[in-house]
Amino acid sequence: MIKNYDLIVLGAGITGLSVARQKLLDEPYCKILIIEKECKIGMHGSGRNSGVLHSGIYYPSSTLKARFCAEGSKLMSQYCEDHNLPILRCGKIILPTNVADESQIDLLHDRGLANGASVEIISQKEIREIEPEANTIVQKALYSPNTSVVDPHKVLEKIQFELINSGVTILFNEKLMSAIPDKSKIKTNKGHSFEYGHLINCTGQHSDVVSKIFGVGRKYTLLPFKGFYYGLHKDSNIRLNGLIYPVPDLNIPFLGVHSVKLVNGSVYFGPTAIPAFGREHYEGFEGINVKDASSITYHLLRQYISNKKGFRAYTHQEASRFLKSEFLKSMQNLIPNLSSNDLVTSQKVGIRAQLLDKGRNELVMDFLVEKMDNTTHVLNAVSPAFTSAFSFAKYILNK
């Protein structure tokens, strides 16, 4: 028997769940199905997220990230407060790590204001007052007092609970295998067939593969980058009040290694951004995909050779951080008193699924959504996608 739904969402990460939630807010009687290939939510990008609600400082005002980040942060913060979910309002300092970075502070300040963020340029004295452990050799830094941290799993679980109570069907261990787009029909690994009024692809690390089943996004592929962290030793004398980030290289879609403070008070440092040889290659040999590995290697070599936007230097920098000693040096630019004994190996690791435009041989910097007929495909939804999820969901549905 073929079951019919008004809307089918592929992927039960934060984007997929937020899309279903927003659709119910717009159309309470909509019949919705969510298909998730894992046995539960939060197994990949959304569940491995640091939980930082960004303020919208980094992105040019013309981008989708700029449009949705500040509003999304406010909506997510309000959602956590309304449902008594943990939220840590700790603030964030963005520090220059060299003289050239200081001019970027003014640029980031202007971007933040243009994007609706609350930001201010602070002096050496103010840096010491807010974060005594921060590097105060610099003349100035950028302060984002409203940057917060939430518990990603608690957020996902609450949205899932609400959706199920509202009649949404969520199928786990179910994976799309084939589609007949002109008949609005899909088939899963369990032999189930479903018809849809509209289908939205929110499969994150697999979005490019899924989109191609529907004839969409053929010029794109995903390059997975692994981010690992060190934890702060429980006996360390280092005390951080909030988050400390470096001024990022705005040519590269990564924010650099920084401090992360979880809602339970635990502190981590990271992430790195080294190539992964599979979309779910979190550790060891598990998750390595031979086909993916060859494609990833090929496209990374093209990036390295072309050296667009300084990719080669960035690669060397990130490769060196695989060594604890080099990782520590990067963190000491932010927190000078941090020592090797303060860093402990952590199980915290994630994959950033970064979209590549194969034709231009360029990393896609902004969110990207493409539509064909009655299907919509979220091809690029990396940071700050968790922060932006509620705001971004409205755009995806309107798209």
Image (cartoon, grey):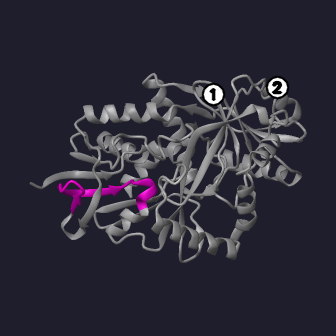
Tell me the element at label 2. helix
Above or below, 387 relative to 155: below
Tell me which label, 1 or 2, sits earlier in the chain. Answer: 2
> What's the amino acid at mark 1?
Ser
Between 33 and 145, the residue placed more toward the observer is 33
Question: Residue drawn at (24%, 46%), measured in percent from left and top?
Answer: 32
The quarter of the rendered structure image containing the C terminus is bottom left
Q: Position of residue 319 (x, y in %)?
A: 71, 57
Residue 197: image quadrant is: bottom left
The residue that mark 2 highlights is: 129
Q: On the rendered structure, is 307 left or right of 390?
A: right
Q: Quadrant of the N terminus?
A: bottom left
Q: Is residue 192 in the magenta section?
A: yes
- At x 88%, y 34%, the residue is 124
Where residue 235 sits, quadrant-wise, is: top right
- Classify 120 as above or below 372: above
Report the front residue among 127 and 170.
Answer: 170
Mark 1 neighbour density, 10 Å: few (under 14) some (14–19) many (20 or more): few
- Magenta part of the protein: which range? 185-207
Query: Which residue is identified by label 1?
Result: 266
Regarding mark 1 in the picture, which secondary structure is present there?
loop
Viewed as shown, does residue 205 lie left or right of 197?
A: right
Q: Nearer the viewer, mark 1 or mark 2?
A: 1
Query: 236 or 5: nearer the eye?
Result: 236
Would you call the spot at circle 2 few (<14 residues within 10 Å), some (14-19), or many (20 or more)? few
Q: Amino acid at mark 2?
A: Glu
Q: Position of residue 367 (x, y in %)?
A: 51, 57
- Label 1, label 2: how far apart the Cα atoms are: 21 Å
**Residue 278, horizontal then vertical, whole percent:** 50, 59
Outermost residue, left side: 1
> Closest to the observer: 255 or 118?
255
Give the answer, above or below, for where 9 lies relative to 83: below
